[in-house]
Image (cartoon, helix red, strand yellow):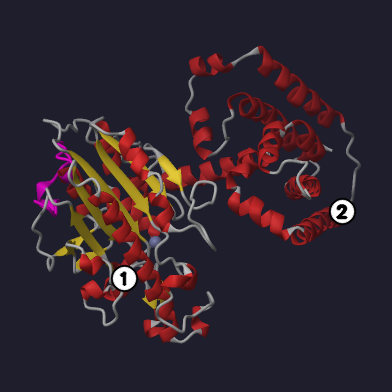
Amino acid sequence: MVSLFFIFFDNYSFYKNVLEVYPLEEGMNIVYLLSLSLVIVLFNIFLFTLVSSKYTIKPILIVIVVVSAFTSYFMDTYHVIIDDLMIQNALQTDLDESLDLLSFKLLLYVLFLGVLPAYLVYRVKLKPLSFKEAIFSKVKLLLGSLLVIVLLLLSFSKFYTSFLREHKPLRYSVNPTYWIYSIGKYISLVANRGEVEFKQIGLDAKISPPNTPHKLVIVVIGEATRADHFSLNGYKRETNPLLKKEKIINFKNFYSCGTSTAVSVPCMFSLYGRDDYSYKKGMATENVLDVINHTKQVAILWRDNNSDSKGVALRVPFEDFKYGDKNTICDIECRDEGMLVGLDRYIEQHKNQDILIVLHQMGNHGPAYYKRYPKEFEKFTPVCKTNQLENCTKESIANAYDNAILYSDYFLSKVIGLLKNYQNSYDTTMFYIADHGESLGENGLYLHGLPYFMAPDAQTHVASLMWFGKNNQHKVDEEKSYSQDNLFHTLLGLFNVKSEVYDEKMDILK
Ligand SMILES: [Zn+2]
């Protein structure tokens, strides 16, 4: 009954959002939405049954009903999403701020959606069951609801794929499922972060005098691109046909901070070097984007076609380009090139300002390398067309991987092309760094993520290069060994940011 109550009374925002995407009068939508509602009800039944027992069921349901009345109110009124950050915000809110949120409407919500149903739950008489009976009825309910969910998912698999993948934000307003999930996520985040206090750095950051001409910098974060598969680094195959035509600085010995996206991406933007970086410290300290942001003189934008920014862009504008609602260049998946669409407008909107744009690529994300490029980039064949890499020959894996590099070569040349349009009015720079490398079957190793000390060169020696506009050329020793530790200071140097956290010795361009 409580599960039904939620779907009927606590999900106004959810249905409002869903109906915008799937209007009732179109096609089979009414059937899909009925099935979706049933799946949500059954899913809640499943969850509640898991934690139910004679002594726990009532208190748990009462708490969930009351909290959901609040979340309903805030979602319906402020169109907020109750995610982990919102929970964090809520917990860090002081009484003054909370009082500001009180209203008569909130009182009605809490009374009718919270207190009243909670009272009814309290009044229910539980039927005493023997231990055996209780277990049996629980298992029956768990398996039964799970079975029907699976059947519904399979029967309308196309709808559910679209619902879950193309319209990911829709699920953020399912009440109470999403706030319960968010609390779990928040707890695990806090547990991982320990007692470390969040630290601001570079509050003294300043660009003085202001840059003339202004700076336009695009940082591209590559995905799983090992250095030795770039022909620029001497690879036997031509995998950089477009980049080789450009005047670039190609770092032959560039090393990653970690062997996975989740380590390398936050680490390269952090003040800490690989030796003293940890997830805890990284999350608890501002990064180079924050420092540049402190100058209030640079427009910053992060566009992401990978998973997300791994916490780096939490305090700067972030745009998700993984889905067709934002990314306009999608075939079997959304392409990195789509992140360039609309950048001209962004630059136009921020003229008379320095600009920093970060593009986080899908790049060579494994194991399905064959999906990472449009058909016309399939130059090396035959390609391994499964994610079960061990079933493919080494050659066909490398073929698929190299085709994906060809697409990155094209993407990076497009970025350079975009910057060329501005090189007369800006100091333009592109800085490309792959997050980590990739094993392609050498010694039976695939993918990446080995502990750093035992990772082969293939996973840590990454592709990296820079391109400058005609008015701001730099001379750099391409043979010298650099690492992702250099990004923090090189970026500050590129914008002429003066701050106590800037270390000239770590700036590649100094
Ligand atoms: Zn990665």
Q: Which mark is residue 137?
A: 2
**Which quadrant of the structure image shows residue 255?**
bottom left
Is 171 a magenta residue? no
Q: Position of residue 239 (x, y in %)?
A: 31, 74
> In this picture, which residue range is highlighted in magenta?
494-510
Identity of the residue drawn at 48% across and 55% down: 329
Distance from disc 1 to disc 2, alpha carbons, whole Å, reads 55 Å
- Label 2 is placed on what type of residue? Ser
Q: Which mark is residue 251?
A: none
> As drawn, is 263 to the left or to the right of 424?
right
In what element is the residue under mark 2?
Answer: helix
Q: Which mark is residue 226?
A: 1
Name the chief secondary structure element in magenta.
Answer: loop
- Label 1 is placed on what type of residue? Arg
Identity of the residue drawn at 40% across and 70% down: 404
Which residue is at the front of the view, 67 or 338? 338
Which residue is at the front of the view, 88 or 306? 306
Of marks 1 and 2, the one in the foreground: 1
Q: Position of residue 24 (x, y in %)?
A: 77, 41
> As drawn, is 187 to the left or to the right of 468?
right
Is 497 a magenta residue? yes
> As drawn, is 293 to the left or to the right of 60?
left
Identity of the residue drawn at 60% across and 15% down: 102
Image quarter where ligand 1 lies: bottom left
Is 332 located above or below residue 44 in the figure? below
Is 396 located above or below residue 293 in the figure? below
Is 226 located above or below residue 173 in the figure? below
